[in-house]
Image: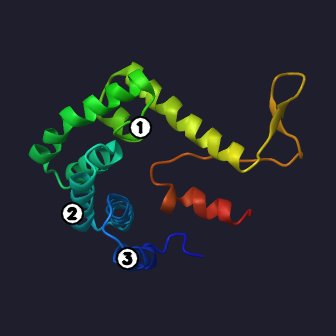
Amino acid sequence: SLVGDTKKALEIARTLSGEGDSWETYFNLGTTCQIAGEIEEGIKNYEKAIKLNPGFGLSYGQLYNLYSRICAWNKASKLLPEIKKLNSQALKDGSMPAELPFGNISREQNSKMNLFLARLKCKEIENKAKADLVRFVQDSKGRGLSVNKKIRVGYLSSDYHDHATVHLILGLL
């Protein structure tokens, strides 16, 4: 299992990144670097992703997060106008926002935007569950039950990749 093995995951991501020069490659490598704690390398990859595709908002949000981690506040603050613009656009038309709910709620006290981003993320998770054919029904009291009577546990965390809960859940699988 590669869960928690960030060094191996980073090694694989670096190898795969040599196979193409696309914004997706740099975004994914930036994310892997972020998880592995390779902040400077993550910053470089998110910057490349933005250069290749300035319309992909999550690159800005993740880059803001990394600048904040190293206290590069001047660089982080320069990203805020684009983050706010992309988030506002997403609120209007349902497009991809510039940040995840965790980043937004820690940065901005705008309850309308916080709720919108949280609902959007929940909808994304719901759609993934539907794609995996997870069906839910409700009992007579309105409580959710799975059709096949198995209990499905959902857990959402910004650091789930190496959180104690993921290691505990793995023991149940």
Point out which mark residue 165 bears.
none
Report x, y in % for residue 36: 37, 68
Say what amino acid the circle numbered 1 marks: Met
Left or right: where does residue 5 sit relative to residue 144? left
Label 2, secondary structure: give it.
helix
Give the residue displayed 50% in from the left and 70% down from the top.
4
Counting other residues with Cα less than 10 Å from the Cα at mark 3, is it few (<14), some (14-19), or many (20 or more)?
Answer: few
Q: How far is the residue under mark 1 from the one under mark 3?
A: 26 Å
In the figure, 105 relative to 75: above or below? above
In the figure, 144 relative to 68: above or below? above
Nearer the N terminus, badge 2 or badge 1?
Answer: 2
Point out which mark residue 44 bears.
2
Point out which mark residue 19 bears.
3
Q: Are marks 1 and 3 in contact (CB under 8 Å)?
A: no
Nearer the N terminus, badge 1 or badge 3?
Answer: 3
Say what amino acid the circle numbered 2 marks: Lys
Q: Nearer the viewer, residue 113 or 17?
A: 17
Q: Do the residues labelled 2 and 3 touch (CB within 8 Å)?
A: no
Report x, y in % for residue 154: 65, 46
Q: Quadrant of residue 137?
A: top right
Left or right: where does residue 115 sit relative to residue 97? right
Report x, y in % for residue 161: 50, 60
Q: Can you say which quadrant of the picture contains the N terminus?
A: bottom right
Nearer the N terminus, badge 2 or badge 3?
Answer: 3
Give the residue displayed 75% in from the left and 47% down from the top.
152
Q: Label 1, on which residue?
A: 96
Q: Nearer the viewer, residue 135 or 16?
A: 16
Say what amino acid the circle numbered 3 marks: Glu
Counting other residues with Cα less than 10 Å from the Cα at mark 2, is it few (<14), some (14-19), or many (20 or more)?
Answer: some
Counting other residues with Cα less than 10 Å from the Cα at mark 1, is it few (<14), some (14-19), or many (20 or more)?
Answer: some
